[in-house]
Amino acid sequence: MKIAFNNVVKNYGSVNALNGVSFTIKPSEFVFLVGSSGAGKSTLIKLLLAQIKPSSGEININDQDLNSFRKKELDEHRRKIGVIFQDYQLIVDKTIEENIALALDISGYPQNQIKSRIDEVTTLVNLHHRQNQFPSQLSGGELQRAALARALAPNPEVILADEPTGNLDNENSWNLLRLFKKINQKFGTTILMTTHNQDFIDSLKYRTIIIDDGLIVKDLPTKES
Ligand code: ADP
C-alpha cells in the first residue's frame, strides 16, 4: 500500500492537532514516527484508519483520495491494516487462539484455514505453546506478541503500531522489535511504528519521521548499513 499525506490539517475545535503534514510511505517501508506527547501521532494514525477526516488536505491510498472511499472501499482499506496498541487490547475472556480466530473471522478469512493460520502466526511470534491460555495468564511481552499475531493473521499490507513497546521492559521491547523487522523483511509488510525509544531508532537505521506540534520537523531516510 502506498500512503501519501498531502498538506493534511486536522483541527479539533480550536486545537490544531496537525498543521499541514506531507509525506509518502512506499509499500514495504519501515518507518518510525517520533514525537512528544500531544505532537499529533495518534491523530495521524486515526486519519490513516479513516476513523476521523482531515479538516483540509488529502490522504491518498494507492493514489486514490481516502475521502472518496465508499463504505465497501473503506472496509477493504481497513482490512489491509493491522493495528497494535500500547495496552494490547486483547479480549480478556477469550484465549489467545480465540482472539486471533475472531480477528480472522471478521476479516472474512476462509473458515477452513483459520486453525492453520492461527498455528502459523503463533509459531512465528513464539507463542504456539501458549495459544490456549487467557490474556491474564501471559506476561506483558507475551501479550504484545499475541497482539502482533492477531494483527498479522489476516495478512495485512500495513501494520500500524502505536507505542507497542510502551509497557515492555528492554528485553521484551527488543524481542518485539526483532519480530517487526522479520515481518517487514519476510512478508514485505509496511510498518509504521510510533516510539520514544531512541535506541531502536539509532540501532535500526530505518526512516524516521519526527513530528512536533502538528508539523513534520525532520524526515530522515533509511540509512544504508
Ligand atoms: P500524540 O499521539 O502525539 O500524543 P495526539 O494526536 O493524540 O498526539 O494529539 C494532538 C493534539 O490534539 C493534542 O493537543 C491533543 O490534546 C489534541 N487532541 C487529540 N484528540 C483530540 C480530541 N478528540 N479532541 C480535542 N483535542 C484532541
Image: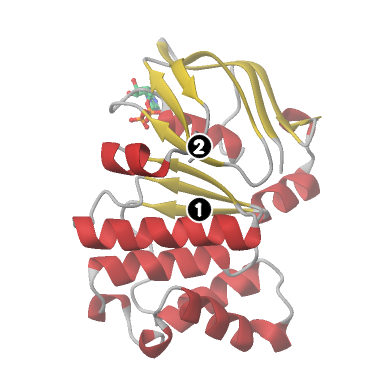
* Element under disc 1: strand
Gap in Å between the C-alphas at discs 2 and 1? 9 Å
- Crowd class of label 2 (few under 14; some 14 to 19; many from 20; radius 10 Å): some
Image spot of residue 11 (x, y percent): 48, 16
Disc ID at residue 83: 1
Amino acid type of disc 1? Val
Disc ID at residue 157: none
**Is 136 positioned to the left or the right of 47 in the image?**
left
The residue at label 2 has a CB less than 8 Å from ligand 1: yes
Q: Badge 2 is on which residue?
A: 45
Q: Nearer the viewer, residue 30 or 46?
A: 30
Tell me where residue 140 sits by quadrant: bottom left
Q: Indicate whether 100 appears above or below 10.
A: below
In the rendered image, the quadrant that contains the N terminus is top right
Image spot of residue 45 (x, y percent): 50, 37
Image spot of residue 209 (x, y percent): 46, 27
- Quadrant where ligand 1 appears: top left
- Crowd class of label 1 (few under 14; some 14 to 19; many from 20; radius 10 Å): many
Residue sitting at x 33%, y 51%: 86
Residue sitting at x 28%, y 28%: 37
Amino acid type of disc 2? Ile
Residue sitting at x 41%, y 23%: 210
* Callout 2 touching callout 1 (CB < 8 Å): yes
Res. 197 visible in picture: no
Q: Nearer the viewer, residue 14 or 218?
A: 218
